[in-house]
Image: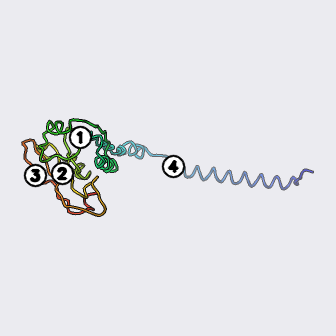
Amino acid sequence: MPISYPKKSIVRFATIIIFFMVLLGLYVQANAEKLEVSPAALASHEQLPEPIPKPKAEPIPELSVYKDANCGCCEKWLTHVEQRGFRVKSHNIDKLFEFKTAKGIPASLQSCHTAVSSQGYVFEGHIPAKFISAFLASPPKGALGLTVPAMPVGSPGMEYQDKFRPYQVLQLNADGSTYVYAEVKSLEESVQ
């Protein structure tokens, strides 16, 4: 059975609703000037600065690595540089010595693999990735690249237990000279 309300109650309810609607209308009318947007406010909105552009992502540095197909420590070094943000293309070649010599790396400064950056710089041997990054960020004038001659124990890819032998990262220059680019004195420095 439907609920029925007395007509008096419905009339009172409707009167209250109408009363509040009239009050709301009067309030809006009284405050309309405050709600309007002034031309000065519009003009200031038009002069807002452009949004700050998002910084461009740094390109991922690429290295082409030339090595012997059977070199296990080379594979470990590749993993080291990949884990630190480099994109690596590995190439197994037979005439590695000739390749290194053609790139300007003397026999006394050679190691087991040679990385070449997209800019043409060479990185010979077990160089910690952080030094390659620093070099590429600001290449020294007249430099061919960096080298860690031989295969020092504790260098990236040459980890063995907790053994470590301090070593130098040398800058190889186009004129054939070298310069100490960095000295690595601890295992922690080496594998960062």
Cα separation between marks 4 and 2: 82 Å
Three-letter amino acid code at the position of disc 2 = Ala
Secondary structure category for the residue under label 3: strand
Dot in front, 1 or 4: 1
Residue found at x 93% / y 51% = 1
Dot in front, 2 or 1: 2
Q: Are marks 2 and 1 in contact (CB under 8 Å)?
A: no
Secondary structure category for the residue under label 1: strand
Between discs 1 and 4, the one toward the N terminus: 4
Cα separation between marks 2 and 1: 21 Å
> Residue 103 at what x, y percent from top left?
15, 38
Between discs 3 and 4, the one toward the N terminus: 4
Residue 122 shown left or right of residue 177 in the figure: right
Three-letter amino acid code at the position of disc 1 = Ser
Q: Are marks 3 and 1 in contact (CB under 8 Å)?
A: no
Q: Which residue is mark 1?
A: 117
Cα separation between marks 3 and 2: 17 Å
Q: Tell me the number on the disc at residue 19.
A: none
Q: Tell me the number on the disc at residue 33.
A: 4
The quarter of the displayed image where residue 95 is located: top left
Residue 85 shown left or right of residue 127 in the figure: right
Three-letter amino acid code at the position of disc 4 = Glu
Secondary structure category for the residue under label 2: loop
Residue found at x 42% / y 43% = 42
The quarter of the displayed image where residue 91 is located: top left
Q: Are marks 1 and 4 in contact (CB under 8 Å)?
A: no
Dot in front, 4 or 2: 2
Q: Are marks 4 and 2 in contact (CB under 8 Å)?
A: no
Q: Which residue is mark 2?
A: 150
Residue 148 shown left or right of residue 50 in the figure: left
